[in-house]
């Protein structure tokens, strides 16, 4: 692995959907390792899956990094690897969920060379299991952040947004 190659594992979780949620990120490059997690008082699993990827990419100090992201989220992996998100972007995310996060994702995604690999959740993949643990522990904390977009826009119409 070259020194500019980054391996990233991500996971998101929510207790109830919507409900308290969190994400976990594990970044690895050579001997370097960093974990990031955060919890929110009301959000969804898909928002946490996507936010984990965003925060992980935003944590990188340099641009044009080669990043392989391992995620158990078909929502995130398929949206990018199958190119759906780029079509959504062309239509200004009309009638799509989580446009705030997808816009934020695309801004940071384009600063790196990113490849996604889908992994089956809860299948003894060490990186995925660690991130799942971080995500769950994050939403169990007493002090939880506020997912402002979700609570101000999406929560008014829970039947549509997730």
Image (cartoon, rainbow, N blue to C red):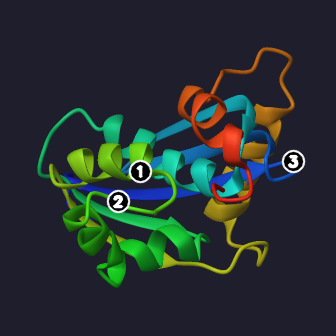
Residue 152, x across and y down, in percent: 60, 28
Q: CA distance from mark 3 to mark 1?
A: 22 Å
Residue 26, x across and y down, in percent: 53, 48
Q: Residue at x 78, y 14 (%)?
A: 143
Mark yes or no: residue 32 visible: no
User: In the figure, residue 104 lies in which quadrant?
Assistant: top left
Q: Which residue is mark 2?
A: 93
Residue 126, x across and y down, in percent: 68, 64
Q: Nearer the viewer, mark 3 or mark 1?
A: 1
Q: Which residue is mark 3?
A: 15
Indicate whether 33 appears above or below 3: above
Q: Which residue is mark 1?
A: 99
Mark yes or no: residue 132 visible: yes
Residue 74, x across and y down, in percent: 56, 77
| Callout 2 touching callout 3 (CB < 8 Å) | no
Front-most of residues 48 and 32: 48
Q: Is residue 47 left or right of residue 134?
A: left
| Callout 2 touching callout 1 (CB < 8 Å) | yes
Q: Residues within 10 Å of mark 2 (few under 14, many from 20)?
A: some
């Amino acid at each position: 692995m070259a020194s500019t190659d980054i391996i990233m594992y991500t996971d998101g979780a929510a207790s109830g959907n919507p409900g308290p949620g969190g994400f976990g990120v594990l970044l690895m490059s050579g001997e370097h390792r960093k974990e990031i997690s955060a919890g929110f008082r009301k959000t969804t699993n898909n928002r946490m899956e996507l936010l984990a990827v965003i925060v992980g990419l935003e944590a990188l100090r340099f641009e044009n990094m080669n990043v392989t992201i391992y995620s158990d989220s078909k929502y995130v992996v398929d949206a990018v690897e199958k190119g759906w998100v780029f079509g959504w972007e062309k239509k200004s995310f009309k009638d799509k969920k989580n446009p705030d996060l997808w816009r934020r994702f695309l801004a940071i995604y384009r600063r790196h060379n990113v490849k996604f690999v889908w992994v089956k959740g809860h299948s003894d993949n060490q990186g995925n299991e660690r991130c799942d643990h971080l995500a769950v522990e994050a939403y169990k904390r007493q002090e939880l952040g506020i997912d402002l977009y979700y609570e101000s826009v999406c929560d008014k119409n829970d039947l549509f947004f997730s």
